[in-house]
């Protein structure tokens, strides 16, 4: 039996049986952890009000050999989520961010970079930064930390610089120069402005990007390209992204 305690970011809380909840959370030291909070659904539970998705908390847990789920023994809220919970769009966006981290994070492996990325993303959203910008920054860095989408410096096929733009392979595997895309029988053009966005995130944090943000058109282009790359890697769409798109589209009718 191992006893742990660490600062964590809560990713998901779901019901288990009549009184318990399953909690998925991210730590720097142990990566993704899934555990049971016994009695968390009861009215006067010690966990009441503490298990909030995307909140930062100090969590204690007990790990037993051979068990898939740890037993959560203590939760102390450090930073609650407030702004994202004020309206539906914020709640839906928060769910997409949490699910993407849960999909890419590994159990039992340190996740320092991913933890810092998620922490900074939540802080920026809670501070009221442009949601499209923050989401594109987060999604791009998430794929970069996973080794799926390296910084777009030059064409991996011929070595040509991407400064004048690039192309996303039809398969969604990644970027190549436009000449190589034609050789590979297709690819969607990617503007120089989108390439510049991906280069900027390597040297600027979210606050710096917010001070001089890209246009909505560039952010939309980045979202489309990142979505295709992510779907190619996962072989499916992120469920909460589909829910958010359908829900918001329904509200606009």
Image (cartoon, rainbow, N blue to C red):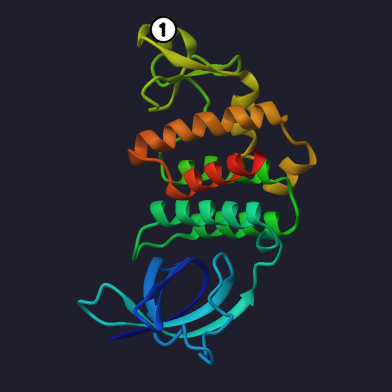
From the top left corner, tell me how far across and down residue 230 is, in percent: 42, 38
From the top left corner, tell me how far across and down residue 145 is, in percent: 46, 46
Q: Looking at the image, which is closer to me, 221 or 123?
A: 221
Residue 150 in sight in this render: no
From the top left corner, tell me how far across and down residue 2 is, in percent: 32, 84
Outermost residue toward the right in this view: 211
Which residue corresponds to mark 1? Answer: 182
Looking at the picture, does residue 251 appear above or below residue 174?
below
All told, the count of numbered labels is 1
Outermost residue toward the front in this view: 253
> What residue is rendered at 39% in x and 19% in y?
170
Badge 1 element: helix
Left or right: residue 1 compared with residue 179: left
> What residue is rendered at 56% in x and 76% in y?
57
Residue 62: quarter of image: bottom left
**Which quadrant of the figure contains the C terminus?**
top right
**Which quadrant of the figure contains the N terminus?**
bottom left
From the top left corner, tell me how far across and down residue 84 is, in percent: 66, 60
Residue 198: quarter of image: top right
């Amino acid at each position: 039996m191992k006893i742990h305690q660490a600062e964590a970011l809560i990713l998901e809380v779901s019901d288990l049986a009549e009184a318990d909840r399953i909690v998925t959370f991210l730590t720097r030291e142990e990566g993704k952890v899934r555990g049971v909070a016994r009695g968390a659904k009861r009215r006067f539970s010690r966990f009441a009000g503490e298990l909030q998705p995307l909140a930062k908390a100090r969590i204690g847990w007990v790990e037993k050999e051979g068990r898939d789920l740890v037993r959560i023994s203590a939760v102390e809220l450090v930073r609650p989520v407030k702004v994202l919970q004020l309206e539906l769009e914020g709640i839906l966006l928060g769910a997409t961010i949490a699910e993407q981290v849960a999909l890419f994070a590994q159990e039992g492996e340190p996740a320092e970079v991913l933890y810092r990325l998620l922490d900074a993303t939540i802080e920026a959203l809670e501070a009221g930064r442009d949601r499209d910008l923050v989401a594109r920054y987060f999604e791009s860095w998430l794929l970069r930390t996973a080794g799926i989408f390296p910084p777009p410096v030059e064409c991996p096929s011929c070595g040509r610089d991407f400064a004048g733009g690039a192309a996303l392979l039809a398969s969604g595997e990644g970027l190549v120069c436009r000449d190589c895309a034609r050789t590979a029988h297709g690819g969607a053009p990617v503007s120089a402005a989108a390439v510049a966005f991906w280069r900027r995130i390597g040297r600027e944090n979210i606050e710096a990007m917010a001070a001089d943000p890209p246009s909505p058109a560039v952010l939309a282009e980045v979202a489309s390209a990142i979505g295709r790359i992510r779907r190619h890697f996962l072989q499916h769409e992120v469920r909460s992204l589909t829910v958010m798109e359908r829900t918001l589209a329904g509200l606009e009718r």
